[in-house]
Amino acid sequence: MWSALVNLMSKFLTFFYNLTVNMGFPSYGWAIILFTVVVRLLLFPLNLKQAKAMKVQQILQPRVTQLQQQYKNSPEILNREMMALYKKYKANPMSGCLPLLIQMPILFALFNCLREYQFDQVGTSFFWLPNMNNPDPTWILPILVAGSSYLQSKVSMAAQPPQAGQMQSMQVTMLYVMPLMLGFMTRNFSAGLALYWTAYNSMGFLMQIVTNYIVKNSHEDIKKEIEDDQLREELERAERAKVKAKAKAEGKARREAQPRTQPKKNNKKQGPEDDRGKPLDFDDFE
């Protein structure tokens, strides 16, 4: 199945090359660029869906943290409350992973297709590149790969909340170290594969800007609704605390207003033994 997917990618690339031939300028370089643009546009809905799902999770994260602290000793209640939260705002923690799982096989197949593709002699030169089968002798493409990777990572991280600690270190690595590694690796890749990578990252940079704009505007209503719900819950908790404090104060006032109970009278009847110690009354003997 994997080989069939790679062969399908090869047929698509050949189709775009034949398209340039019919247009009168046979060029594998333009065929790769057209192919990359079409693949990016086809995958855009999946990328947008993934971005929206991640944005909802980001907005809900403070509520999730609050629930985890509130019900840390009651796992069953925590799961029920979290499911109700996700259901209310139509969020699915797994929805952000599904588009990525669908894209990865396509992208890897496309990568293998261009790595193993045998370019014909006609149309293999492209601007300063003498042949698509060989690495770029000028190192211009590796530099473009590194630069486009940096730009795509930069605009992608702009849509994420600021991180701290280890996560911040990982972001710095992804932003600076990874593009340099990609640029260094592509110096030995074929020019066709390096050109694809440059076009793919450049399209990703442009489409990420569009994605950030769409996601930001489409989630303003959800963000406002969540903030309103939090404010309403805080007001309700404050009102309940106020009522409870008032009832407690009234109960204390009633207890203080009640008269103190009088000491109980000793109604115990005196018996014979109770006369001991009394002066004798001689009249009792008459």
Image (cartoon, rainbow, N blue to C red):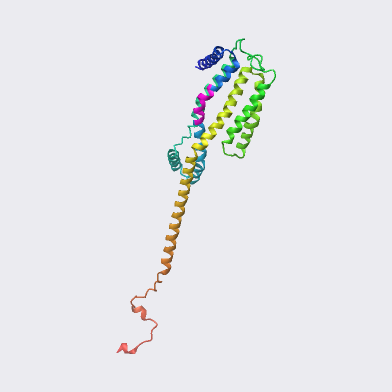
Residue beneath the point at 57% across and 29% down: 206
Secondary structure predominantly adopted by residues drawn in magenta: helix
Please tell me in which quadrant of the rendered image residue 146 appears. Answer: top right
Which is nearer the eye, 211 or 267?
211
**Is 40 included in the stretch rendered in magenta?**
yes
Q: Is residue 61 above or below residue 11?
A: below
Identify the residue at the far right of this view. Answer: 138
Q: Is residue 234 above or below residue 43?
A: below
Which is nearer the eye, 164 or 136?
136
Identify the residue at the far front of this view. Answer: 24
Q: Residue 125: image x %, image y %?
A: 64, 14
Q: Residue 252: image x %, image y %?
A: 43, 64
Q: Which residues are magenta?
A: 38-48
Q: Residue 165: image x %, image y %?
A: 62, 39
Which is nearer the eye, 84 or 184?
184
Q: Is residue 158 above or below residue 240?
A: above
In the image, 277: left or right of 127?
A: left
- Image label count: 0
Identify the residue at the far left of this view. Answer: 286
In the image, 232: left or right of 200?
A: left
Residue beneath the point at 65% across and 31% down: 176
Please tell me in which quadrant of the rendered image residue 286 appears. Answer: bottom left
Q: Residue 159: image x %, image y %?
A: 56, 36
**Is 203 included in the stretch rendered in magenta?**
no
Which is nearer the eye, 279 or 216?
216
